[in-house]
Amino acid sequence: MSKIRSLNVNTSIRQRSVTEFLFKSGDISATTIHSKLQPVYGNETIDRCTIQRWVQRFQKDDFYLHYKERPGKPSTVTTDQNLALVEEICQE
């Protein structure tokens, strides 16, 4: 599992937002963005290679802050059915 998938989705979205802001603020490299994120997010900081991919997509204006839904790959596992199943398991 990639590091980005193992992170809290909100943490990932926040880092994407900051990355987009820093990128659009001026000529700033992925390495510099990564070094600015590290003191704030610590071990949860997205790896530099991922930030580089994001920057490349920002340059092409081909980027979405939230994960796009794709067939067979939901953007979240929080569904009514899953919540009911977890509640049932907890009650047992």
Image (tube, rainbow, N blue to C red):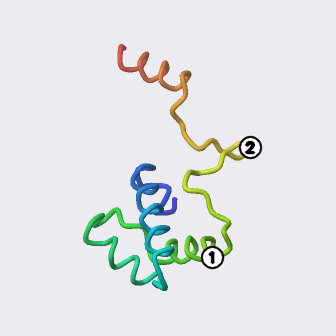
Residue beneath disc 1: 59
What x and y, as percent, mark residue 13?
46, 55
Point out the image quarter for the C terminus.
top left
What x and y, as percent, mark residue 54?
56, 70
User: What residue occupies the far left of the structure in this picture?
Assistant: 39
The image quadrant that residue 88 belongs to is top left
User: What residue occupies the far front of the structure in this picture?
Assistant: 25
- Identify residue type, mark 1: Gln
Residue located at (61% from left, 77% from top): 56
Residue located at (55% from left, 56% from top): 65
Mark 2 and mark 1 lie on one chain; the one further toward the N terminus is: 1
Is 60 placed left or right of 10 in the picture? right
Q: CA distance from mark 2 to mark 1?
A: 27 Å
What x and y, as percent, mark residue 81?
56, 22
- Identify residue type, mark 2: Pro
Viewer-nearest residue: 15 or 91:
15
The image quadrant that residue 40 belongs to is bottom left
Q: Dot 2: within a 10 Å radius of its alpha carbon, few (fewer than 14), some, or many (20 or more) residues?
A: few
Residue located at (71% from left, 47% from top): 70
Q: Nearer the viewer, mark 2 or mark 1?
A: 1
What x and y, as percent, mark residue 38?
31, 72
Q: Secondary structure at mark 2?
A: loop
- Look at the picture and state if 73 lies above or below 12: above
Is 74 placed left or right of 90 in the picture? right
User: What residue occupies the far right of the structure in this picture?
Assistant: 71
Residue located at (34% from left, 62% from top): 44
Which dot marks residue 71?
2
